[in-house]
Image (tube, helix red, strand yellow):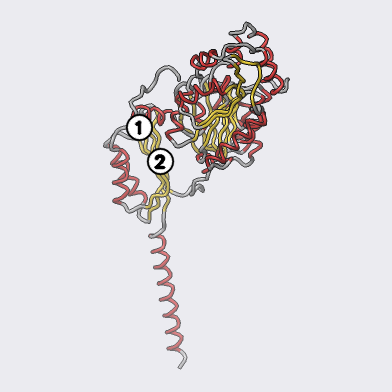
Amino acid sequence: MNEPRHIDSLTERRQAETRLAEQQHLGRQRQAYSVLITVSGADRPGVTGLLFTVLSQHEVDVVDVDQVVVRGRLTLGVVVETTGDPERLQEAVEQAMDTLKMRVDVVIGDDGESSKRTPTHVLVVLGKPLQAKAIGSLARRFGELGVNIETIQRIADYPVTGVELSVTAPDDETLRAAVAEIGAATKVDIAVQRAGLARRSKRLIVFDVDSTLITGEVIELLADHTGRRAEVEAITTAAMRGELDFEQSLRHRVAMLEGLDAAVLDEVGRSLELTPGARTTIRTLKRLGYRCGIVSGGFTQVARHLVTELELDFVAANTLEVVDNRLTGKVIGEVVDRQGKARALARFAMESGVAMNQTVAVGDGANDIDMLSAAGLGIAFNAKPMVAEFADTTLNQPFLDPVLFILGISRDEVEAADTADGLSRRGPQV
Protein backbone atom coordinates (compact mmCIF):
# COMPACT_ATOMS: atom_id res chain seq x y z
CA MET A 1 0.00 0.00 0.00
CA ASN A 2 2.97 2.35 0.69
CA GLU A 3 4.91 1.64 -2.58
CA PRO A 4 2.79 3.83 -4.89
CA ARG A 5 3.06 6.72 -2.36
CA HIS A 6 6.88 6.29 -2.41
CA ILE A 7 6.89 6.45 -6.22
CA ASP A 8 4.69 9.53 -6.18
CA SER A 9 7.02 11.17 -3.66
CA LEU A 10 10.08 10.40 -5.77
CA THR A 11 8.38 11.70 -8.88
CA GLU A 12 7.38 14.91 -7.13
CA ARG A 13 10.93 15.43 -5.88
CA ARG A 14 12.36 14.99 -9.36
CA GLN A 15 9.78 17.37 -10.81
CA ALA A 16 10.70 19.94 -8.17
CA GLU A 17 14.39 19.57 -9.00
CA THR A 18 13.61 20.02 -12.67
CA ARG A 19 11.60 23.18 -11.98
CA LEU A 20 14.43 24.56 -9.83
CA ALA A 21 16.98 23.87 -12.56
CA GLU A 22 14.77 25.61 -15.11
CA GLN A 23 14.38 28.62 -12.82
CA GLN A 24 18.12 28.80 -12.26
CA HIS A 25 18.72 28.59 -15.99
CA LEU A 26 16.16 31.32 -16.60
CA GLY A 27 17.78 33.41 -13.88
CA ARG A 28 21.13 33.07 -15.58
CA GLN A 29 19.56 34.09 -18.84
CA ARG A 30 18.02 37.15 -17.22
CA GLN A 31 21.12 38.17 -15.28
CA ALA A 32 21.80 41.87 -15.65
CA TYR A 33 25.29 42.52 -16.98
CA SER A 34 27.06 45.83 -16.44
CA VAL A 35 28.83 46.99 -19.59
CA LEU A 36 31.23 49.95 -19.84
CA ILE A 37 31.59 51.25 -23.40
CA THR A 38 34.29 53.83 -24.17
CA VAL A 39 34.36 55.45 -27.61
CA SER A 40 37.27 57.68 -28.65
CA GLY A 41 38.58 59.37 -31.76
CA ALA A 42 38.21 62.50 -33.85
CA ASP A 43 35.05 64.34 -32.84
CA ARG A 44 32.38 64.56 -35.53
CA PRO A 45 28.61 64.92 -35.71
CA GLY A 46 26.64 61.71 -35.30
CA VAL A 47 28.91 59.67 -33.00
CA THR A 48 26.73 59.93 -29.91
CA GLY A 49 23.55 59.50 -31.93
CA LEU A 50 24.77 56.34 -33.63
CA LEU A 51 25.98 54.80 -30.38
CA PHE A 52 22.66 55.34 -28.62
CA THR A 53 20.74 54.07 -31.64
CA VAL A 54 22.61 50.78 -31.33
CA LEU A 55 22.06 50.70 -27.57
CA SER A 56 18.32 51.28 -28.02
CA GLN A 57 18.11 48.29 -30.36
CA HIS A 58 19.40 46.08 -27.54
CA GLU A 59 16.99 47.47 -24.90
CA VAL A 60 19.67 48.38 -22.39
CA ASP A 61 19.32 50.61 -19.34
CA VAL A 62 21.68 53.61 -19.26
CA VAL A 63 23.40 53.93 -15.87
CA ASP A 64 26.02 56.63 -16.47
CA VAL A 65 27.33 58.85 -19.28
CA ASP A 66 30.40 61.09 -19.56
CA GLN A 67 31.59 62.91 -22.66
CA VAL A 68 34.50 65.29 -23.18
CA VAL A 69 36.12 66.85 -26.23
CA VAL A 70 39.71 68.07 -25.99
CA ARG A 71 41.25 69.75 -29.04
CA GLY A 72 38.85 67.97 -31.37
CA ARG A 73 39.35 64.53 -29.80
CA LEU A 74 36.25 62.89 -28.35
CA THR A 75 36.08 60.51 -25.40
CA LEU A 76 32.58 59.18 -24.68
CA GLY A 77 31.95 56.73 -21.86
CA VAL A 78 28.62 54.98 -21.27
CA VAL A 79 27.75 52.43 -18.58
CA VAL A 80 24.70 50.29 -19.36
CA GLU A 81 22.96 47.28 -17.90
CA THR A 82 21.57 44.53 -20.11
CA THR A 83 19.81 41.20 -19.55
CA GLY A 84 20.67 40.15 -23.07
CA ASP A 85 23.92 38.81 -24.48
CA PRO A 86 26.61 41.41 -23.67
CA GLU A 87 28.95 40.00 -26.28
CA ARG A 88 26.37 40.53 -29.03
CA LEU A 89 25.99 44.10 -27.75
CA GLN A 90 29.74 44.58 -27.89
CA GLU A 91 29.89 43.27 -31.46
CA ALA A 92 27.06 45.57 -32.59
CA VAL A 93 28.70 48.64 -31.01
CA GLU A 94 32.10 47.86 -32.51
CA GLN A 95 30.64 47.40 -36.00
CA ALA A 96 28.68 50.66 -35.79
CA MET A 97 31.60 52.70 -34.48
CA ASP A 98 33.92 51.25 -37.10
CA THR A 99 31.83 52.95 -39.78
CA LEU A 100 32.88 56.28 -38.21
CA LYS A 101 36.48 55.12 -37.66
CA MET A 102 36.08 55.43 -33.88
CA ARG A 103 37.97 53.28 -31.39
CA VAL A 104 35.85 51.23 -28.97
CA ASP A 105 36.80 49.65 -25.66
CA VAL A 106 34.23 47.44 -23.90
CA VAL A 107 34.42 46.06 -20.36
CA ILE A 108 31.78 43.52 -19.34
CA GLY A 109 31.09 43.03 -15.66
CA ASP A 110 30.92 45.14 -12.50
CA ASP A 111 34.27 46.55 -11.45
CA GLY A 112 33.04 47.41 -7.96
CA GLU A 113 32.29 51.03 -8.82
CA SER A 114 28.69 50.65 -9.92
CA SER A 115 27.71 54.11 -8.74
CA LYS A 116 29.47 57.43 -9.21
CA ARG A 117 30.78 59.01 -6.03
CA THR A 118 29.50 62.42 -5.12
CA PRO A 119 32.42 64.90 -5.00
CA THR A 120 33.02 66.62 -1.68
CA HIS A 121 35.05 69.55 -3.01
CA VAL A 122 35.67 71.58 -6.15
CA LEU A 123 39.13 72.99 -6.88
CA VAL A 124 39.86 75.69 -9.45
CA VAL A 125 43.54 75.79 -10.45
CA LEU A 126 44.67 78.97 -12.21
CA GLY A 127 48.00 79.90 -13.74
CA LYS A 128 49.60 82.03 -16.42
CA PRO A 129 50.94 79.73 -17.66
CA LEU A 130 49.48 76.67 -15.94
CA GLN A 131 52.29 74.15 -15.96
CA ALA A 132 51.85 70.40 -15.77
CA LYS A 133 54.00 70.40 -12.64
CA ALA A 134 51.17 71.95 -10.61
CA ILE A 135 48.59 69.34 -11.64
CA GLY A 136 51.11 66.55 -11.20
CA SER A 137 52.03 67.72 -7.71
CA LEU A 138 48.37 67.89 -6.75
CA ALA A 139 47.64 64.42 -8.13
CA ARG A 140 50.59 62.84 -6.32
CA ARG A 141 49.72 64.50 -3.02
CA PHE A 142 46.08 63.50 -3.40
CA GLY A 143 47.14 59.90 -3.89
CA GLU A 144 49.02 60.02 -0.60
CA LEU A 145 46.02 61.51 1.22
CA GLY A 146 43.38 59.21 -0.27
CA VAL A 147 41.79 62.07 -2.24
CA ASN A 148 40.19 60.85 -5.47
CA ILE A 149 39.88 63.07 -8.54
CA GLU A 150 36.43 62.44 -10.03
CA THR A 151 36.50 64.86 -12.98
CA ILE A 152 38.82 67.43 -14.56
CA GLN A 153 37.67 70.02 -17.06
CA ARG A 154 39.03 73.23 -18.52
CA ILE A 155 37.23 76.31 -17.29
CA ALA A 156 39.34 79.09 -18.82
CA ASP A 157 42.06 79.74 -21.37
CA TYR A 158 42.10 83.54 -21.12
CA PRO A 159 43.41 85.72 -19.52
CA VAL A 160 44.70 82.81 -17.44
CA THR A 161 44.48 79.07 -17.93
CA GLY A 162 42.16 77.39 -15.47
CA VAL A 163 41.01 73.85 -14.80
CA GLU A 164 38.30 72.67 -12.43
CA LEU A 165 38.73 69.46 -10.46
CA SER A 166 35.91 67.67 -8.65
CA VAL A 167 37.38 65.55 -5.87
CA THR A 168 36.30 63.27 -3.07
CA ALA A 169 38.31 63.98 0.07
CA PRO A 170 38.11 62.26 3.46
CA ASP A 171 39.09 65.39 5.39
CA ASP A 172 38.45 69.07 4.63
CA GLU A 173 41.25 70.54 6.75
CA THR A 174 43.91 68.18 5.41
CA LEU A 175 42.84 68.87 1.83
CA ARG A 176 43.05 72.64 2.27
CA ALA A 177 46.44 72.45 3.94
CA ALA A 178 47.84 70.32 1.13
CA VAL A 179 46.41 72.61 -1.53
CA ALA A 180 47.86 75.71 0.14
CA GLU A 181 51.27 74.08 0.32
CA ILE A 182 51.26 72.99 -3.33
CA GLY A 183 49.86 76.30 -4.56
CA ALA A 184 52.70 78.19 -2.87
CA ALA A 185 55.34 75.76 -4.12
CA THR A 186 54.16 75.78 -7.75
CA LYS A 187 53.12 79.46 -7.81
CA VAL A 188 49.56 78.84 -8.99
CA ASP A 189 46.26 79.92 -7.47
CA ILE A 190 44.11 77.06 -6.19
CA ALA A 191 40.63 77.84 -4.88
CA VAL A 192 38.97 75.18 -2.73
CA GLN A 193 35.23 75.11 -2.12
CA ARG A 194 32.75 72.58 -0.80
CA ALA A 195 30.89 70.93 -3.67
CA GLY A 196 27.13 71.17 -3.87
CA LEU A 197 24.42 73.77 -4.21
CA ALA A 198 26.06 76.23 -1.82
CA ARG A 199 28.77 76.97 -4.37
CA ARG A 200 26.20 78.02 -6.96
CA SER A 201 23.90 79.87 -4.59
CA LYS A 202 25.90 83.11 -4.32
CA ARG A 203 23.78 86.17 -5.09
CA LEU A 204 25.62 89.26 -3.87
CA ILE A 205 29.22 90.43 -4.30
CA VAL A 206 31.15 93.41 -2.93
CA PHE A 207 34.54 94.68 -4.03
CA ASP A 208 37.08 96.77 -2.25
CA VAL A 209 38.05 99.66 -4.52
CA ASP A 210 41.68 100.68 -4.11
CA SER A 211 44.07 98.15 -5.67
CA THR A 212 41.16 95.75 -6.19
CA LEU A 213 38.46 97.17 -8.46
CA ILE A 214 40.88 99.87 -9.61
CA THR A 215 44.65 99.70 -10.07
CA GLY A 216 45.67 102.54 -7.77
CA GLU A 217 44.88 104.22 -4.44
CA VAL A 218 42.45 107.14 -4.66
CA ILE A 219 43.92 109.07 -1.74
CA GLU A 220 47.34 108.92 -3.37
CA LEU A 221 45.89 110.25 -6.62
CA LEU A 222 44.37 113.14 -4.65
CA ALA A 223 47.65 113.73 -2.83
CA ASP A 224 49.37 114.14 -6.22
CA HIS A 225 47.60 117.51 -6.38
CA THR A 226 49.02 118.63 -3.04
CA GLY A 227 52.62 117.52 -3.55
CA ARG A 228 52.44 115.15 -0.56
CA ARG A 229 51.98 111.83 -2.32
CA ALA A 230 55.11 110.22 -0.87
CA GLU A 231 53.95 110.89 2.70
CA VAL A 232 50.46 109.63 2.03
CA GLU A 233 51.74 106.57 0.18
CA ALA A 234 53.95 105.51 3.09
CA ILE A 235 51.04 105.72 5.55
CA THR A 236 48.69 103.86 3.18
CA THR A 237 51.15 101.00 2.74
CA ALA A 238 51.59 100.58 6.48
CA ALA A 239 47.83 100.71 7.07
CA MET A 240 47.13 98.05 4.42
CA ARG A 241 49.70 95.79 6.07
CA GLY A 242 47.81 96.21 9.34
CA GLU A 243 50.61 98.10 11.04
CA LEU A 244 48.50 101.20 11.72
CA ASP A 245 44.94 101.73 12.94
CA PHE A 246 42.95 102.38 9.79
CA GLU A 247 40.77 105.20 11.10
CA GLN A 248 43.70 107.10 12.59
CA SER A 249 45.77 106.65 9.44
CA LEU A 250 42.83 107.77 7.30
CA ARG A 251 42.29 110.96 9.29
CA HIS A 252 46.01 111.67 9.18
CA ARG A 253 46.14 111.28 5.40
CA VAL A 254 42.93 113.25 4.79
CA ALA A 255 44.36 116.13 6.84
CA MET A 256 47.12 116.41 4.23
CA LEU A 257 44.44 117.20 1.62
CA GLU A 258 43.25 120.37 3.40
CA GLY A 259 42.69 123.24 1.01
CA LEU A 260 42.48 121.08 -2.11
CA ASP A 261 40.00 122.32 -4.73
CA ALA A 262 36.91 120.07 -4.60
CA ALA A 263 36.86 119.97 -8.42
CA VAL A 264 39.83 117.60 -8.19
CA LEU A 265 37.51 114.92 -6.77
CA ASP A 266 35.60 114.65 -10.04
CA GLU A 267 38.80 114.93 -12.04
CA VAL A 268 40.28 111.96 -10.22
CA GLY A 269 36.97 110.06 -10.39
CA ARG A 270 36.90 110.36 -14.16
CA SER A 271 40.52 109.19 -14.47
CA LEU A 272 40.25 105.98 -12.44
CA GLU A 273 41.78 102.96 -14.15
CA LEU A 274 39.78 99.75 -13.69
CA THR A 275 41.62 96.54 -12.92
CA PRO A 276 41.70 94.38 -16.08
CA GLY A 277 38.62 92.18 -16.17
CA ALA A 278 36.60 94.32 -13.74
CA ARG A 279 34.00 95.37 -16.28
CA THR A 280 33.65 91.83 -17.65
CA THR A 281 33.29 90.38 -14.16
CA ILE A 282 30.57 92.76 -13.01
CA ARG A 283 28.72 92.63 -16.34
CA THR A 284 28.65 88.83 -16.23
CA LEU A 285 27.54 88.63 -12.60
CA LYS A 286 24.74 91.13 -13.18
CA ARG A 287 23.52 88.99 -16.08
CA LEU A 288 23.19 86.17 -13.57
CA GLY A 289 21.15 88.30 -11.18
CA TYR A 290 23.90 89.15 -8.71
CA ARG A 291 23.66 92.33 -6.66
CA CYS A 292 27.02 94.07 -7.10
CA GLY A 293 28.56 96.86 -5.04
CA ILE A 294 31.66 98.43 -3.56
CA VAL A 295 32.74 98.78 0.05
CA SER A 296 35.62 101.21 0.24
CA GLY A 297 37.83 103.00 2.70
CA GLY A 298 38.00 105.65 0.00
CA PHE A 299 35.58 108.46 -0.70
CA THR A 300 31.98 108.71 -1.89
CA GLN A 301 32.68 111.72 -4.11
CA VAL A 302 35.07 109.61 -6.18
CA ALA A 303 33.32 106.25 -5.84
CA ARG A 304 30.11 107.59 -7.39
CA HIS A 305 31.87 107.62 -10.75
CA LEU A 306 32.38 103.86 -10.47
CA VAL A 307 28.76 103.36 -9.42
CA THR A 308 27.58 105.15 -12.55
CA GLU A 309 30.08 103.58 -14.95
CA LEU A 310 29.58 99.98 -13.75
CA GLU A 311 25.88 100.32 -12.85
CA LEU A 312 26.51 99.12 -9.31
CA ASP A 313 23.69 98.47 -6.88
CA PHE A 314 25.21 99.94 -3.73
CA VAL A 315 28.22 101.72 -2.29
CA ALA A 316 29.69 102.32 1.16
CA ALA A 317 32.60 104.76 1.49
CA ASN A 318 33.82 107.76 3.48
CA THR A 319 32.72 111.31 2.75
CA LEU A 320 35.19 114.18 2.59
CA GLU A 321 34.04 117.46 4.10
CA VAL A 322 33.91 120.31 1.59
CA VAL A 323 33.44 123.98 2.53
CA ASP A 324 33.47 126.76 -0.07
CA ASN A 325 34.56 124.27 -2.72
CA ARG A 326 37.65 123.34 -0.72
CA LEU A 327 38.49 120.19 1.23
CA THR A 328 38.73 120.88 4.96
CA GLY A 329 40.97 117.91 5.64
CA LYS A 330 38.22 116.12 7.60
CA VAL A 331 35.87 113.18 7.10
CA ILE A 332 32.13 113.52 7.74
CA GLY A 333 30.21 110.83 9.63
CA GLU A 334 31.17 107.28 10.58
CA VAL A 335 34.41 106.04 9.09
CA VAL A 336 34.18 102.92 6.91
CA ASP A 337 37.02 100.99 8.52
CA ARG A 338 37.68 97.29 8.99
CA GLN A 339 34.56 96.71 11.11
CA GLY A 340 32.57 99.19 9.03
CA LYS A 341 33.20 97.21 5.86
CA ALA A 342 31.81 94.04 7.44
CA ARG A 343 28.77 95.95 8.69
CA ALA A 344 28.19 97.39 5.21
CA LEU A 345 28.28 93.91 3.67
CA ALA A 346 25.76 92.65 6.23
CA ARG A 347 23.51 95.67 5.60
CA PHE A 348 23.55 95.22 1.83
CA ALA A 349 22.77 91.52 2.24
CA MET A 350 19.82 92.26 4.55
CA GLU A 351 18.46 94.97 2.23
CA SER A 352 18.72 92.57 -0.72
CA GLY A 353 17.16 89.64 1.12
CA VAL A 354 20.31 87.58 0.67
CA ALA A 355 21.73 85.29 3.36
CA MET A 356 25.33 85.94 4.39
CA ASN A 357 26.40 82.51 3.13
CA GLN A 358 25.28 83.65 -0.33
CA THR A 359 27.64 86.65 -0.36
CA VAL A 360 31.10 87.12 -1.86
CA ALA A 361 33.70 89.70 -0.84
CA VAL A 362 36.88 90.61 -2.72
CA GLY A 363 39.63 92.69 -1.14
CA ASP A 364 43.34 93.10 -0.58
CA GLY A 365 44.05 95.07 2.60
CA ALA A 366 44.00 94.59 6.37
CA ASN A 367 40.82 96.66 6.55
CA ASP A 368 39.13 94.01 4.38
CA ILE A 369 39.76 91.14 6.81
CA ASP A 370 36.44 91.29 8.68
CA MET A 371 34.50 91.61 5.42
CA LEU A 372 36.32 88.64 3.87
CA SER A 373 35.72 86.57 6.99
CA ALA A 374 32.03 87.44 7.19
CA ALA A 375 31.21 86.69 3.54
CA GLY A 376 30.10 83.27 2.38
CA LEU A 377 33.17 83.34 0.12
CA GLY A 378 36.08 85.67 0.86
CA ILE A 379 38.59 86.18 -1.96
CA ALA A 380 41.93 87.83 -1.19
CA PHE A 381 43.01 89.63 -4.38
CA ASN A 382 46.79 90.18 -4.66
CA ALA A 383 46.60 90.59 -0.92
CA LYS A 384 49.12 91.07 1.82
CA PRO A 385 50.10 87.75 3.49
CA MET A 386 48.23 88.45 6.72
CA VAL A 387 45.04 89.15 4.74
CA ALA A 388 45.23 85.91 2.77
CA GLU A 389 45.14 83.94 6.03
CA PHE A 390 41.58 85.15 6.69
CA ALA A 391 40.22 84.53 3.17
CA ASP A 392 38.68 81.36 1.77
CA THR A 393 40.88 81.60 -1.28
CA THR A 394 43.44 83.86 -2.90
CA LEU A 395 44.01 85.27 -6.37
CA ASN A 396 47.49 86.46 -7.30
CA GLN A 397 46.81 87.34 -10.93
CA PRO A 398 46.50 90.93 -12.23
CA PHE A 399 42.98 90.22 -13.53
CA LEU A 400 39.55 90.10 -11.91
CA ASP A 401 38.04 87.62 -14.40
CA PRO A 402 39.23 84.62 -12.32
CA VAL A 403 36.63 85.58 -9.72
CA LEU A 404 34.10 84.25 -12.26
CA PHE A 405 36.00 81.00 -12.69
CA ILE A 406 36.08 80.43 -8.93
CA LEU A 407 32.30 80.84 -8.94
CA GLY A 408 32.01 78.09 -11.56
CA ILE A 409 31.46 80.36 -14.59
CA SER A 410 33.61 79.33 -17.55
CA ARG A 411 35.34 81.59 -20.05
CA ASP A 412 33.32 80.03 -22.86
CA GLU A 413 30.06 80.95 -21.09
CA VAL A 414 31.25 84.52 -20.57
CA GLU A 415 32.22 84.93 -24.22
CA ALA A 416 29.03 83.32 -25.50
CA ALA A 417 26.97 85.81 -23.49
CA ASP A 418 29.10 88.73 -24.69
CA THR A 419 28.77 87.61 -28.30
CA ALA A 420 24.99 87.36 -27.93
CA ASP A 421 25.02 90.98 -26.71
CA GLY A 422 27.14 92.09 -29.66
CA LEU A 423 30.31 92.58 -27.62
CA SER A 424 33.81 91.62 -28.70
CA ARG A 425 34.82 88.11 -27.66
CA ARG A 426 38.33 89.15 -26.66
CA GLY A 427 40.20 92.37 -26.36
CA PRO A 428 41.69 94.69 -23.76
CA GLN A 429 40.96 93.25 -20.33
CA VAL A 430 38.33 95.61 -18.94
Q: For this rendering, which residue is in front, 277 or 301?
A: 301
Q: Residue furthest top?
A: 227
On the rendered image, what quadrant is the C terminus found in?
top left
The x, y position of residue 422, in whole percent, is 33, 26
Indicate the amino acid at tag 1.
Gly
Residue 341 seen in the figure: yes
Residue 388 seen in the figure: no
Q: Residue furthest bottom?
A: 1
Q: Residue at x 55, y 31 (%)?
A: 206
Q: Please, what secondary structure does the residue beneath circle 2 have?
A: strand
Q: Please, what secondary structure does the residue beneath circle 1 have?
A: strand
Residue denoted by label 2: 77
Q: Residue at x 59, y 37 (%)?
A: 347
Quarter of the view holding residue 192: top right
The x, y position of residue 158, in whole percent, is 45, 22
The x, y position of residue 168, in whole percent, is 56, 41
Asked if the residues shown at circle 1 and circle 2 are in contact, with their CB atoms under 8 angstroms apart, the answer is no
Would residue 74 appear left or right of 263 to someone viewing this image?
left
Quarter of the view holding residue 240: top right
The x, y position of residue 62, in whole percent, is 39, 49
Quarter of the view holding residue 233: top right
Residue denoted by label 1: 41
